[in-house]
Amino acid sequence: MKQLMQDKHLFEYAVIRIVPRVEREEFINVGVILYCRDLKYLNSKYTINEDRLKALCDQLDCTEVLEHLKSFERICSGNAEGGPIAKLDIASRFRWLTATRSTIVQSSKVHPGFCTDPTATLNKLFNQLVT
């Protein structure tokens, strides 16, 4: 049992949401951000279903939303194109991405768990919570 727990690593994740009209508090889950300190892992996965988004708000600019999601991706990877936030340490980048904000692209509260493979866990959460 002890060996099994040693193979598991604490991770934190948040769901990425599109909130077209903040005042209505309606949203669609479009992605997941996962952070695992022990494995120095920070990654996101997302998709945009334009039909669903347009059904919620027909004036939404899906191209602009996609650019915001791409910035999440650049920040996760530490890509210089992600701006000054992408230059922060991995934990600070995760905390910045999951900070409470009232914009079109938001994240849920952060939730913890244990995993052995963070990429597999990210994919599993994405399939459960987004698709």
Image (cartoon, rainbow, N blue to C red):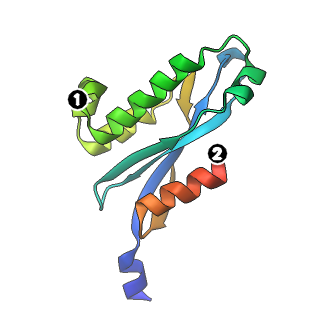
Q: Secondary structure at mark 2?
A: loop
Q: Residue at x 60, y 14 (%)?
A: 61
Q: Which mark is residue 31?
A: none
Against 122, residue 24 (above or below) is: above
Whether residue 113 is visible here, answered yes or no, is: yes
**In x, y percent, where is residue 17?**
60, 33
> Mark 2 belongs to which amino acid?
Val
Disc 2 vs disc 1: Cβ atoms closer than 8 Å? no
> Mark 1 belongs to which amino acid?
Ala
Q: Secondary structure at mark 1?
A: helix
Quarter in which the N terminus is drawn:
bottom left
Comparing 72 with 97, the one in front is: 72
**In x, y percent, where is residue 96?**
38, 32
Query: According to the image, label 1 marks what residue?
Result: 80
Q: Based on the displayed image, in which of its 4 quarters is residue 124 positioned?
A: bottom right
Label 1: how many residues lie within 10 Å, few (<14), some (14-19) or many (20+)? few
Query: According to the image, label 2 marks what residue?
Result: 130
Q: Residue at x 49, y 55 (%)?
A: 122
Choose the circle earlier in sequence order: 2 or 1: 1
Q: Residue at x 73, y 17 (%)?
A: 57
Left or right: where does residue 55 sit relative to residue 21? right
Q: Residue at x 54, y 26 (%)?
A: 105
Whether residue 112 is visible here, answered yes or no, is: no
The residues bearing labels 2 and 1 have C-alpha atoms spaced at a distance of 28 Å
